[in-house]
Image (spheres, rainbow, N blue to C red):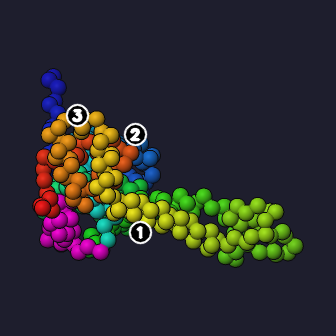
């Protein structure tokens, strides 16, 4: 008997995509995902449930390829909008209502962002829940109408700093205290020999303050990037200085503040900075006018 030919996966139907995403979320709720990968049982359940719901006989490899593709697409979307605040939402286009200059600056940063300019990411809410490892109960889900996506970087940083604070608080008391002759518990990791008292609220406030100061310092570096600073960096890049035409274009590009800020933001990422420079010099934006 001839082997049955494998059916080619077709994901053009949005409803089919929605069913697949929900099927994956169901397995997350059932704890069949470890880290970013589903268990063997989880994938088996996904294959069966997807077939029952759609009638499409896709195997594990085909479904996993779609899962990875959705994750990659969502990552671009989240990197673009994950920190956006105070911007209107366009329900018709399912994306943010941002000015042309904002979009052009973002496309300088990453050309892939352009795909979401006219049309947003389908099922962004569900995908955010799926790929941010949040329990799929809606508690932490993002509503498009809110105009703000969960801030991945900020949430992670704050969580790490707060978790690193050694807080030993009595249950139901809100603070450590001396009860029934027990010695006062140590709060905030303060040495027993010191007399300085650290409360949970103070420890958390200090952690948040430190994060805010770090963010402010980084923002100051970006916004205060001078032509002299960026030119010094350019002169140290052999790949740029060895090409007279490219070097001239980069010099012209650095005359614009948004470009200088973007250039500085790539500090520590030499290869990415070089790729961006080549793209930006060959694809001038509207703000690059004298």
- Specify the label residue 40 is tagged with: 2
State the CA–CA distance, disc 3 to disc 2.
53 Å
Quadrant showing the N terminus: top left
The reply to whether residue 68 is in sight is: no
Question: In this figure, which residue is indicated by the disc labeled 1?
Answer: 139
Look at the image and say whether residue 186 sits in the magenta stretch. no
Q: Which residues are magenta?
A: 86-105
Q: Which sits in the foreground, 113 or 59?
A: 113
Badge 3 element:
loop
Quadrant showing the C terminus: bottom left
The reply to whether residue 28 is in sight is: yes
What residue lies at 38% left-to-right and 52% top-to-bottom?
27
Nearer-N-terminus badge (2/1)? 2
The percent position of residue 108, horizontal first and vertical second, equals 21, 54
Look at the image and say whether residue 101 sits in the magenta stretch. yes
Name, please, the residue furthest toward the front.
228
What residue lies at 32% left-to-right and 58% top-to-bottom?
226
Question: In this figure, which residue is indicated by the disc labeled 3?
Answer: 242
């Amino acid at each position: 008997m001839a082997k049955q030919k494998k059916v080619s996966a077709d994901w053009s139907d949005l409803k089919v995509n929605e069913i697949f995403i929900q099927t994956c979320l169901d397995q997350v709720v059932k704890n069949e995902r470890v880290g970013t990968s589903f268990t063997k049982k989880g994938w088996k359940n996904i294959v069966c449930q997807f077939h029952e719901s759609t009638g499409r006989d896709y195997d594990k490899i085909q479904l996993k390829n779609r899962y990875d593709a959705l994750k990659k697409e969502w990552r671009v979307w989240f990197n673009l909008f994950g920190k956006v605040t105070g911007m209107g939402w366009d329900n018709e286009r399912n994306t943010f209502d941002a000015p042309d200059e904002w979009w052009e600056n973002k496309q300088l940063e990453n050309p892939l962002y352009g795909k979401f300019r006219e049309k947003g990411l389908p099922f962004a809410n569900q995908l955010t829940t799926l790929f941010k490892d949040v329990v799929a109960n809606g508690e932490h889900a993002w509503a498009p109408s809110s105009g703000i996506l969960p801030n991945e970087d900020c949430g992670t940083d704050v969580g790490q700093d707060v978790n690193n604070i050694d807080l030993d608080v009595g249950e139901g008391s809100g603070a450590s205290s001396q009860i029934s002759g027990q010695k006062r518990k140590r709060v905030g990791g303060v040495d027993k020999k010191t007399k300085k008292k650290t409360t949970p609220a103070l420890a958390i406030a200090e952690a948040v303050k430190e994060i805010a100061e770090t963010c402010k310092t980084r923002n100051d570096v970006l916004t205060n990037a001078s032509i002299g600073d960026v030119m010094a960096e350019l002169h140290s890049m052999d790949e740029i200085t060895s090409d007279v035409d490219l070097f001239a274009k980069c010099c012209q590009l650095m005359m614009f503040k948004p470009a200088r800020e973007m250039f500085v933001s790539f500090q520590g990422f030499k290869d990415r900075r070089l790729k961006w420079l080549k793209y930006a010099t060959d694809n001038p934006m509207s703000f690059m006018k004298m």
